[in-house]
Image: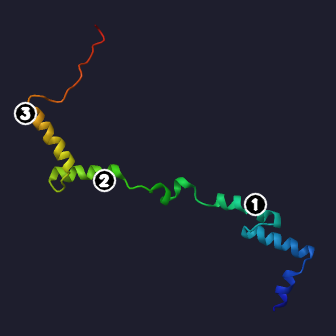
Amino acid sequence: MNKYLKLVQVKTPYNERISRLRNRIFGDPLTKRQQESMRVVKLFSEKPLYKRTEVVDYYPKYGIIEELMVYLRRYGLYRDEHKDFVEHMEKVRLARGKPKWKPKRISKNS
């Protein structure tokens, strides 16, 4: 074993001060007690939740996907059977003379 490595392990006041200085320079905990509270340091060293992509982009962007499907449907490249059925039922209602009911507006003057 190297003699300098043995000197580092000797507990002299000079050696303790040097090891504290080295720990301060490299961001390690300075004392034994400080190692127990490193949990807080670790928490603050991580990225905040609102900046982490795995948290922010967890769900797919449904709004954008829905808009794309509307455009594809207009061009005839996508077929939404539910919307087709709703449009068909609206046409049938209009053909029977029973359009969708709209409530009458109540005027404020009366």
For the point 16% across and 46% down, the residue is 84
Q: Residue 99 sits in which quadrant?
A: top left
Q: Earlier in the sequence, mark 3 or mark 1?
A: 1
Which numbered marker is on residue 1? none
Q: Secondary structure at mark 2?
A: helix
As rendered, which of 45 and 73 lies closer to the eye?
73
Residue 15: x %, y % from top left: 88, 76
- Decide: marks 3, 2 in contact (CB < 8 A)? no
Q: Earlier in the sequence, mark 2 or mark 1?
A: 1
Q: Could you give the CA–CA distance between mark 3 and mark 2, rounded to whole angstroms?
A: 33 Å
Horizontal side of residue 89 vs 103, given as left or right = left
Q: How is the image coloured?
A: rainbow
Residue 6 seen in the current view: yes
Residue beneath label 1, please? 37
Residue 51: x %, y % from top left: 52, 56
Residue 31 seen in the current view: no
Query: In the displayed structure, would residue 86 be above or below residue 32?
Result: above
